[in-house]
Amino acid sequence: MSRRTVLVVDDESDIRELLEVGLARMGIDAECAASFAEARECLARRAYDLVLTDMRLPDGDGLGVISATAELQPATPVAVITAFGSTENAVAALKAGAFDYLAKPIRLQLLRPLVADAFRLPPSGGKRKAAAAEGGTPLLVGGSQPIAQVRSLIARIARTQAPVAITGESGTGKEVAARLIHAGSSRAAGPFVAVNCGAIPEALMESEFFGYRKGAFTGADADREGYFHAARGGTLFLDEVAELPLPMQVKLLRVIQERRFRPLGDTAEQEVDARIISATHRALPERVAEGLFRQDLFYRLNVIELRMPSLREIASDIPALAHGIVERLARQAGATPPELAEAALAALVRHPFPGNVRELENILERALALSAGGQIEVSDLGLAPALAPASAPAARASLRERLEEAERRMILDALERAGRDRDAAAAMLGTSVRGLRLRLARLGIPD
Ligand SMILES: Nc1ncnc2c1ncn2[C@@H]1O[C@H](COP(=O)(O)OP(=O)(O)OP(=O)(O)O)[C@@H](O)[C@H]1O
Ligand SMILES: [Mg+2]
């Protein structure tokens, strides 16, 4: 393989030399630039495999280098060097598209894995192939705009090492997204370790995460490695992260900041070499406000946020999702996939799905078992009939009922003013015709 070349951008000659020497030891050539202007010239002149840039430059900053690289060499990853203790800079750089960061004082033992990761990045075009080749990675179904946005965000964040926090209601595909980010990243060949933070007994948390050495406590009769060790070279997925007890949040924060951890009863520390993705169906900012989640940990985990849309927001994808699910379930059972009756599909599109795609899967799984012929009918779905219009006295009505009442009045009013033209009424209400139809169905207003 031809030798790799890294562009080093820093105005301090000591740091340029340190990096040059460190890279040379790995068999990598370095070219150096002492300013933003020089870096731009270099980027315009030849291709690099990686750019390492200081955040502060005499005539610009690291963010400028990130955007210049994106413009001139979009496939080249950029890692920034941040001042000691400057978390904001690192976060700003990752948000701007940096691949990773290195804190000063530079530790050469951290440079090696960073460079190795950068060189393992699949070329931008290869993302989809990488994900498909992964076999076990479920793909994100759907052509709606919110899903298309999620897909392109996943492709972008897969190319960084930035911590990602995935939010979204239950069953919206948070784990699917985490697996796709891993599969499209430089760590795709490494492990994907999923940890359900809500399922580990508090007393065992530390040993589960960091591992222990024989004799560390009564019952520790052999060495055991933890999740951070298991995820080396790969991705650590902290699912239901809001459930972490506060003392564990403190420990986790320290490990993420220092990028080192120590197994219980061990004298030696280990480097953290795992990309961290977290997920929760809870609103973390609210947990922070309530004092249940540490703000500093929240900022660390939430460098990039990926919100998975609810199934209500992507109702236009319901038919494609339903077909995909029925096909998969039938294939697993070794049966021919049944058709979905038109009325059944229509009923699914109208259903509010508080449990999102997972609920859709459950409904279809049951329907598949019930459907007699080669077709799934509405009656096989077991959906609750639409609610009758509420008539409770306003004084005792809940917030939800009163909101629905207001919604009902606004919709009926708009329909009347629009001469019952649904397109016009939808436009007046600032919603889509589909959105209006969903609301009509939910409120039990005859179409
Ligand atoms: N866009 C999608 N395309 C295909 N399958 C999907 C999609 N979204 C979700 N699924 C499927 O729905 C199910 C739920 O997804 P997943 O477990 O990722 O959700 P989650 O957000 O982690 O849910 P929970 O909060 O309940 O843990 C899975 O079987 C997943 O394969
Ligand atoms: Mg999940």
Image (tube, helix red, strand yellow):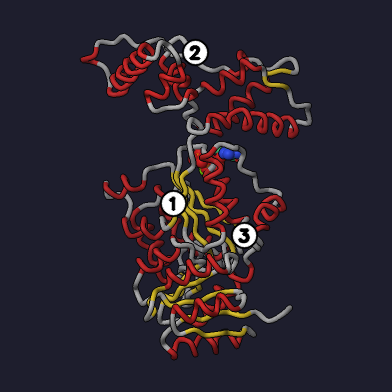
Mark closer to the observer (3, 2): 2
- Does residue 221 appear in the picture of this structure? no
Is residue 150 positioned above or below 261 on the image?
A: above
Q: Count neighbours of disc 3 (C-alpha within 10 A) and say few if under 14, some if 14 to 19, many if 20 or more.
A: some
Q: Amino acid at mark 2?
A: Pro
Question: In percent of the image, x 49 and y 84: which residue is there?
Answer: 33
**Secondary structure category for the residue under label 2:** loop
Under mark 1, the amino acid is Glu
Marks 1 and 2: in contact by CB < 8 Å?
no
Ligand 1 rendered quadrant = top right
- Look at the numbered discs 3 and 2 and tell me whether their residues touch, using CB distance below 8 Å: no
Of the numbered discs 2 and 1, the one sitting upstream in the chain is 1
Mark closer to the observer (3, 1): 1
Q: Which residue is mark 1?
A: 305
- The amino acid type of the residue labelled 3 equals Pro
Q: Which mark is residue 105?
A: none
Residue that lies at the very extreme toward the left in this rendered image: 395
